[in-house]
Image (cartoon, coloured by chain):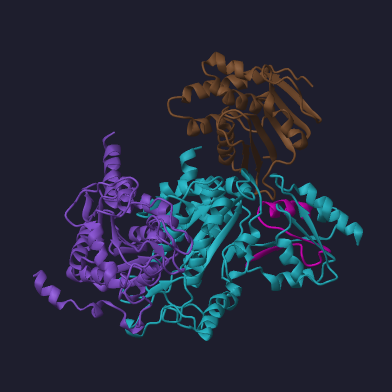
C-alpha cells in the first residue's frame, strides 16, 4: 500500500481524534504502520482541532504531516490551518454547510453535507464517521470492510449501530460527490 | 510489665552514641522529646531494624541521626512526602516522622494537611520550639505575639497556627499535644500514637533556650520548662481555642481520636469491593 | 481480521506517554507518585491503571515536590520508582532530585517538555529544558539524561533509564518533547523490551563494618535495604563513607569526586548516540527528539540531491557523548544545530568543535516543530557557503 498523509480538521468536540484512531486501527490491520499526531486547544469543546495520520509500510523518518494527500475540513475554523502542508493534488473534503471559504493551494475540492447527514441519522456527534466514510470513498485509501471492523473495535458501547450507519452513509454520499475545484 | 520494661530502658541502647557529643544546645527540649520517643519505642518493643525515622531540616530534623535505626534526613519541609513513599513501598516498617514548627507548618504545610487527609499509618512528631533555631532564630508560624526574633526585631505581630486544630481539621485520625515537662505523659502519648492505625499528629512543645529563650529573656531551661506547666492544661481533652490562638490554657493529651479507615486499608477494601462488584455484574 | 488479536500480538498503535508507562512496568517499576500536568498526564493515568495489576503502588500526591519526595522515599525502601512531569513541575522537583543525586537513591524522572518559561504553552511542544535537565538543581551533581525520538524508543529508553539508575545509583531523566510524548505510532512490543533488567546491588555482609558510602572500585557503593540490619543514615548533607554528615574538606572532596566520577567511570555504558551518513559529511546536523526525525528526513533528501550531509543524534544528552561527536565534527566544515529553543545544546556543541568548524543554530520557539524543509534549506545554505 502506498504511503500517504491525511488530516481530519474541524472544531473541538467533533470526534476527529476518534475517527483518526479508527482509520489507524484499520490500516494497521492491513499491515501498515502509522504515526498519529494531533493539535488541540486546552479546552475540550470548540476551538480548532486537527488530527493527522502518516501511513506507510515502514516506520517513517518524520512522523508529522508535511504534504497532505487527504484533508477533511469539518468546520470553518479549520480552513486556514492547513495551507502550508496541503500537498499538490491533495483531495480536500469540506462540509458543504459549515465551510464557506477555501484554503490556499493546488488541490481537488469536494463538498458534501456531512454534518446535516449526521443530523438526519439522529446525532450530530456521528458527523465524524460520515466524514470518514465519505473521505475513504473518495480517496480509496482504506476499504470499507476494514473501516467497519475498526469502528466495531473503537465505537462507544451502545452507539455502534449508529456509528456504522454513519460510516456507510458517508460512503454512499461519496459515490455521487461533485468535484468543486 | 510496664514497670519492668521501664526499668530496663536505657536510652543508650537506642542511640548512636558514637556520634556524641550531639549538636543540641544545653537545655534544648528536643533531647527530652527524643528520649520520650525512644522510651516509647522501647516499651512497644519495636525492633531497631523495623524502625525508620524520617526527618526534615532544622534542629528537629537533625535529632533523627542519633537514633539507632534506619534514619532518613530529607529536605526542608518534605519528610511527610518521603515518609509517604517509604511507608507505601514498605508497609512492614514502622515509619516515624520528626519535624519542626517551621518544617511542618510553613514550608511543609501542604504535605501536612494532605498527610492528615490521607490517613496513612504514620506517626508525625512536630517539635514546636516556636522558632527557626538552626538558622539563628527567625519568626515561625508558631512564634507567639510580641515575641522577639531576628526577623521580628520589634516583636511578632502575625497570628500563630494552632497546629493541632489544623491537623484535626485536615482529618488526622489521631491528634495530641504534650509538653516536654511531662516526660512520662509524652512517652505514653507517643506510644498511643504509634499504636494508632492511621495518621497521628503529635505536637510536642519544646524549648529553644539558647536563642529564642535568651532573646526573649525567658530564663534558663529549667524556668522555660516549668513555665510550660502554667500555659498548658493537662486536665482537658478538649481543644477549645480562643481567637486569636495563643498557646495559653491549651489542652494537652489526646485531642482527637477516631477510627477512620487507614489509607492502605481503605485502598485494599476499595479494590476488593470493585473486584467483587465486577464479578457480580 | 481480528482487532483483539493484534493486541495480543503486541502490535499496537501506542501513544508515547503510554509507551513510557508500559516501559516502566516492564522495567520493574512498582511505585509511581505524580501530579497532573499537561502534556505528561497520560503517563500518570496509565500508571494508575497498570500498577495495581502488578501489585504496585500509584499515588497522586498533593504537589510536584511531594511526588518527587515520595518517589525517593519509596526507592530508599527498595522499590523501583518513577515520576513524570513537565516544565513547571520539573522546576519544582529539582529540590528532591538534588537529594536523590546526593544520596545516590535510584529514581527515574520523565519530563515531557512544553513551551516555557513559566506556564508557557502547556499543549505546545518545545525543547527548552535541555540545560535545566543538566543543571536544574543546585550544586555539582551527577545526572543522566536520555532523549527518545520515537514511541518505540520511549519504551526502550524508559527501561534503559531504570537499568542505568538502579545499577549506577544516579537519578535518570527521560527528556521527551510534547510531539513525541503525544505521538501515536505503530509498535510491536514483542520486539522491544527484550533488554535484560539491571537490579540494584544490595548490601550484604556483616552490618557492623558496613559503610553505606564506601569508596568502591567502580564508584558505586552497594545499597542497604531498610529492615536488613544495616540501620544506616541517609542525608542530603555532605556525608562521609559512614553516611553521617561531614565538613572535613578531604572527605567532602572525595565524596563529590566519587559521585561525579562514577559517571566518568561508566561513560561507555551511559553514552548512546545514533549516526546517519556522518563519515564524509561536510554539514553535520546535531538534533534530538522530534527535531532529529525532521533532520533525518532532511539529511536523506540532501543526500539524494548529492549534498554531503549527516546526522548525529545524541540519545544520551547528558553526559554528552563528546568523544564520538568530536571525532565526527573534526571532518565537517559546518555543524548545524536545530533546536526548539533559542539555542541550548548548541552551547555544548560549540565546546566540542574545532575552531575552524562553523557552528550554526536553527531555532524555533513558537510552539511549532521544526519542519524537514527548514533544515534542508539551512543545510543547503551551509554547503553553498563553503
Horizontal relation, residue C230 to residue B57: left or right: left
Which color was chain B given? purple
Q: Along the line of sight, which residue is nearer the eye, A33 or B220? A: B220
Point out residue C246 in the picture as x, y percentages from the top left corner.
46, 80
Q: Which chain is brown?
A: A
| Residue C291 painted magenta | yes
Residue pictured at 81% horizontal, 51% vertical: C376
Q: Along the line of sight, which residue is nearer the eye, A152 or A8? A: A8
Q: Residue furthest top?
A: A120
- Of the 4 image quadrants, the one containing the N terminus of chain A is top right
Residue pictured at 77% horizontal, 19% vertical: A180
Residue pictured at 57% horizontal, 21% vertical: A168
Quarter assignment of residue B18: bottom left
Q: Which chain is cyan?
A: C
Q: Which residues are magenta?
A: C272-301
Q: Along the line of sight, which residue is nearer the eye, C304 or C283? A: C283
Q: Residue C77: in sight, yes or no?
A: no
Q: Along the line of sight, which residue is nearer the eye, C364 or C289? A: C364
Q: Residue A122: in sight, yes or no?
A: yes
Quarter assignment of residue B169: top left
Q: Is residue C248 above or below residue C323?
A: below
Point out residue C374 in the picture as x, y percentages from the top left corner.
79, 48
Amino acid at each position: 500500500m502506498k504511503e500517504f498523509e491525511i488530516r481530519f480538521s474541524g472544531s473541538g468536540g467533533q470526534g476527529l481524534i476518534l475517527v483518526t484512531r479508527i482509520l489507524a486501527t484499520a490500516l494497521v490491520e492491513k499491515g501498515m504502520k502509522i504515526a498519529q499526531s494531533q493539535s488541540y486547544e486546552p479546552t475540550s469543546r470548540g476551538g480548532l482541532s486537527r488530527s493527522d495520520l502518516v501511513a506507510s509500510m515502514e516506520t517513517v523518518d518524520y512522523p508529522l504531516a508535511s504534504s497532505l494527500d487527504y484533508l477533511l475540513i469539518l468546520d470553518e475554523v479549520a480552513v486556514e490551518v492547513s495551507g502550508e502542508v496541503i500537498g499538490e493534488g491533495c483531495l480536500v473534503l469540506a462540509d458543504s454547510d459549515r465551510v464557506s471559504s477555501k484554503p490556499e493551494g493546488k488541490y481537488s475540492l469536494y463538498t458534501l453535507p456531512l454534518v446535516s447527514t449526521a443530523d438526519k441519522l439522529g446525532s450530530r456527534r456521528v458527523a465524524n464517521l460520515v466524514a470518514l466514510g465519505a473521505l475513504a470513498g473518495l480517496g480509496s485509501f482504506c476499504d470499507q470492510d476494514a473501516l467497519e471492523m475498526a469502528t466495531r473495535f473503537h465505537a462507544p458501547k451502545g452507539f455502534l449501530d449508529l456509528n456504522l450507519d454513519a460510516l456507510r452513509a458517508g460512503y454512499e454520499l461519496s459515490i455521487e460527490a461533485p468535484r468543486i475545484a | 510489665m510496664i514497670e519492668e520494661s521501664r526499668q530496663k530502658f536505657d536510652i543508650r541502647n537506642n542511640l548512636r552514641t558514637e556520634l556524641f557529643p550531639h549538636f543540641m544546645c544545653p537545655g534544648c527540649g528536643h533531647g527530652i522529646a527524643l528520649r520520650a520517643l525512644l522510651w516509647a519505642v522501647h516499651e512497644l518493643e519495636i525492633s531497631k531494624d523495623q524502625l525508620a525515622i524520617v526527618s526534615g531540616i532544622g534542629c528537629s530534623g537533625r535529632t533523627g541521626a542519633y537514633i539507632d535505626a534506619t534514619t532518613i534526613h530529607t529536605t526542608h519541609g518534605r519528610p511527610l512526602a518521603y515518609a509517604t513513599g517509604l511507608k507505601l513501598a514498605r508497609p512492614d516498617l514502622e515509619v516515624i516522622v520528626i519535624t519542626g514548627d517551621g518544617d511542618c507548618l510553613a514550608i511543609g504545610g501542604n504535605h501536612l494537611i494532605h498527610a492528615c487527609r490521607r490517613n496513612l499509618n504514620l506517626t508525625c512528631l512536630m517539635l514546636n520550639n516556636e522558632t527557626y533555631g538552626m538558622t539563628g532564630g527567625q519568626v515561625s508560624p508558631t512564634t507567639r505575639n510580641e515575641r522577639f526574633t531576628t526577623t521580628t526585631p520589634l516583636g511578632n505581630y502575625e497570628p500563630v497556627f494552632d497546629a493541632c486544630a489544623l491537623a484535626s481539621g485536615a482529618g488526622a485520625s489521631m491528634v495530641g499535644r504534650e509538653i516536654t515537662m511531662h516526660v512520662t505523659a509524652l512517652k505514653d502519648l507517643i506510644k498511643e500514637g504509634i499504636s494508632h492505625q492511621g495518621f497521628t499528629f503529635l505536637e510536642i512543645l519544646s524549648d529553644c533556650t539558647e536563642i529564642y529563650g535568651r532573646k526573649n529573656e525567658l530564663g534558663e531551661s529549667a524556668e522555660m520548662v516549668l513555665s510550660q506547666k502554667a500555659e498548658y492544661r493537662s486536665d482537658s481533652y478538649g481543644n477549645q481555642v480562643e481567637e486569636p490562638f495563643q498557646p495559653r490554657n491549651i489542652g494537652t493529651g489526646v485531642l482527637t481520636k477516631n477510627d477512620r479507615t487507614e489509607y492502605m486499608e481503605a485502598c485494599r477494601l476499595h479494590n476488593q469491593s470493585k473486584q467483587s462488584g465486577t464479578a457480580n455484574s | 481480521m481480528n482487532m483483539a488479536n493484534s493486541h495480543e500480538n503486541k502490535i499496537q498503535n501506542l501513544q508515547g506517554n503510554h509507551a513510557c508507562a508500559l516501559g516502566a512496568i516492564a522495567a520493574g517499576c512498582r511505585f509511581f507518585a505524580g501530579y497532573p500536568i499537561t502534556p505528561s498526564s497520560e503517563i500518570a493515568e496509565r500508571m494508575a491503571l497498570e500498577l495495581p495489576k502488578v501489585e504496585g503502588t500509584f499515588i497522586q500526591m498533593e504537589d510536584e515536590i511531594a511526588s518527587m519526595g515520595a518517589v525517593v522515599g519509596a526507592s530508599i525502601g527498595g522499590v523501583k520508582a518513577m515520576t513524570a512531569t513537565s516544565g513547571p513541575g520539573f522546576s519544582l522537583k529539582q529540590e528532591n532530585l538534588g537529594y536523590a543525586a546526593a544520596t545516590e537513591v535510584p529514581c527515574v524522572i520523565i519530563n515531557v517538555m512544553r513551551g516555557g518559561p513559566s506556564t508557557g504553552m502547556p499543549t505546545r511542544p518545545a525543547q527548552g529544558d535541555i540545560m535545566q535537565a543538566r543543571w536544574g538543581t543546585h550544586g555539582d551533581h551527577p545526572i543522566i539524561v536520555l532523549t527518545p525520538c520515537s514511541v518505540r524508543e520511549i519504551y526502550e529508553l524508559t527501561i534503559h533509564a531504570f537499568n542505568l539508575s538502579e545499577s549506577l545509583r544516579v537519578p535518570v531523566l527521560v527528556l521527551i518533547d510534547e510531539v513525541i510524548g503525544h505521538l501515536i505510532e505503530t509498535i510491536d512490543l514483542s520486539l522491544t523490551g527484550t533488554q535484560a533488567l539491571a537490579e540494584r546491588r544490595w548490601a550484604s555482609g556483616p552490618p557492623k563494618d558496613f559503610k553505606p558510602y564506601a569508596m568502591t572500585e567502580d564508584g558505586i557503593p552497594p545499597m542497604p535495604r531498610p529492615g536488613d540490619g544495616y540501620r544506616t543514615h541517609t542525608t542530603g548533607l555532605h556525608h562521609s563513607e559512614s553516611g553521617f554528615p561531614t565538613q572535613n574538606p578531604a572527605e567532602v572532596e572525595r565524596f563529590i569526586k566519587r559521585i561525579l566520577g562514577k559517571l566518568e567511570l561508566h561513560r561507555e555504558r551511559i553514552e548512546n548516540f545514533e549516526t546517519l551518513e556522518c563519515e564524509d559529511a561536510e554539514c553535520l546536523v546535531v538534533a534530538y527528539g522530534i527535531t532529529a526525525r525532521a533532520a533525518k528526513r532532511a539529511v536523506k533528501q540532501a543526500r539524494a540531491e548529492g549534498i554531503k550531509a549527516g546526522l548525529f543524534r545524541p540519545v544520551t544528552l547528558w553526559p554528552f557523548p563528546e568523544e564520538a561527536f568530536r571525532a565526527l565534527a573534526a571532518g565537517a566544515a559546518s555543524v548545524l544545530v536545530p533546536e526548539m529553543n533559542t539555542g541550548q545544546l548548541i552551547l555544548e556543541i560549540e565546546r566540542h568543535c574545532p575552531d575552524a568548524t562553523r557552528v550554526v543554530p536553527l531555532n524555533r520557539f513558537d510552539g511549532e516543530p521544526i519542519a524537514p524543509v527548514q533544515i534542508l534549506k539551512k543545510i543547503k545554505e551551509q554547503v553553498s557557503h563553503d
